[in-house]
Image (spheres, rainbow, N blue to C red):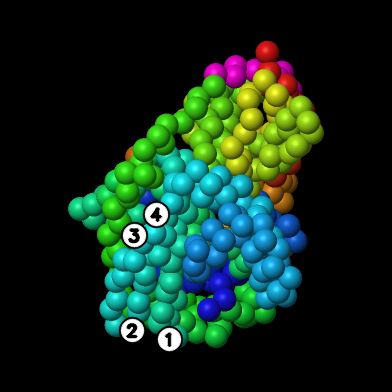
Amino acid sequence: MKTDFQTITWRLIMNNDFLEAGQRKYDSIPIPEDLEINLKRTLKKGRKYRKHSPLFKILGGIAAALLIFVLSVNLSPNIAYAMGNIPLLNNLVQFVNLDKGLNNLVRSGKIQQLNVTAQDKGAKFTATAIAADDLELYISYSFQGKGLFISQMKFKTKDGKSELPWNTFDLPANKNYVEVQTDKLVKDFIIEVQVYKDDPLFHVPMAALSQEVLNNLKSKYDKGFITTLSIPISLSSKILKDTSINITEVNKEFKSEIGTFKINKLQISTSKSVLYCQLLSEDYELIAVDNPMLFDDAGNQYSFSNGIGYLQANNTIRIDFNGNLPLTNSLSFKCSGIKYVNKKDKHITIDVKNNIVEPNNLGVKLISIKGTKITLDSSKGIVTFALNASNEKGEKISIKQISEYPDSKEELEFKSLAYKKIILNVAEVSDNTTDGFDINLGN
């Protein structure tokens, strides 16, 4: 069954259970915050009517195939060449050869064949192989189920009580396995797969559907839950052996117009490399780094993995790069700018009782409050709000969804508006970006 970004986005939008679970995970794990910001930033282009919900904080990766194919391509140039001349396999072979992280793990022997199956109500999931280290985990699997699809994949502790802070991403159609960002491997864990009933309309571009159809699809999706499959995984000592990460303290700085941009450290594992950067500023908060790239002294470029930077505490961001990098002394860092927001503009307060938006530097104004919906005018600048907010007592409240319109109107829907005030968190202001720069990471 073909699975692409549009399809997965549709499936997740319809999943209310996942929305609530995603919000709970977001409240306890800060890393996925930038996932929402980056996806919204992409969707800003064209400024068409659309909706956002907490699902964008944690995207589930959906794919299926046999890792033996990946092994054959990477370990045998002759097989790769032969398969590359078969039209149906050509693109897949090219992609596998480009995935340096998986390639490195396979060549290092950090791979484990599996045959672990769970099935229920016509759905059958089999984990067939795993390749992993402490920064990245790849899982190949097969899924069978007529008229069914996988809506969400989670990773839990062995007892199933706690969710691991591992992030799974949507993958292009020509990827044939799930790629998972990890913080540290554990020997035993559970893959939890949520299965839903499919529908042809889930594959139709959202722009082609009316609001009435969207609402009907949401209801259909909510009723389409079939089952949750739990697959216990136990990693072999071969994978767990020597998974240590090489950490290099970089401590390089660049003076920008909003403060000092500092590259603190570089982590290198077999599968990938991770750069930790920080903005030292009393007035501005780091939102994202635009188009980060690493180059070695031979001019080779190391690409930004997944297109996502992960915001941490203390104005720090984690940037993942594909593949195992060379020594730090031969590297230079380059980006097209830093996205930021003034700390004074991080919050917009809506006085629900008096039906106004309190004065703010971003020019956000209130249009209306009707039922559980608040409509705002952000015509002065394109403002992206986070999907968590708080009331006048500082208690967290959730935003069910944010609908954006071409005329800079934004409609926020809540479960309830039984508050005197609502404090919105500003995730991004689109025009706030510095000029680009580059830094040599060597001595």
Question: As shown in the figure, which amino acid type bears the numbered disc 4?
Answer: Gln
CA gap between label 2 and label 1 equals 7 Å
Q: Position of residue 260 (x, y in %)?
A: 66, 19
Q: Which residue is mark 3?
A: 191
When the figure is inspected, residue 33 is found, relative to residue 40, above or below; the finding is above
> First in sequence: mark 3 or mark 1?
1
Q: Main secondary structure of the magenta part?
A: strand
Residue under label 1: 146
Circle 1 — which element? loop
Question: In whole angstroms, how far apart are the C-alphas of marks 4 and 1?
Answer: 29 Å
Q: Earlier in the sequence, mark 3 or mark 2?
A: 2
Task: Check disc 3 and give the amino acid type.
Answer: Ile
- Is the residue under label 1 in contact with that under label 3 (CB below 8 Å)? no
- Tell me where residue 409 sits by quadrant: bottom right
Range drawn in magenta: 249-258
Horizontal and vertical percent for residue 205? 64, 76
Sequence-wise first label, 2 or 4 = 4
Q: Residue at x 70, y 34 (%)?
A: 294
Q: CA distance from mark 4 to mark 3?
A: 16 Å
Q: Which mark is residue 122?
A: 2
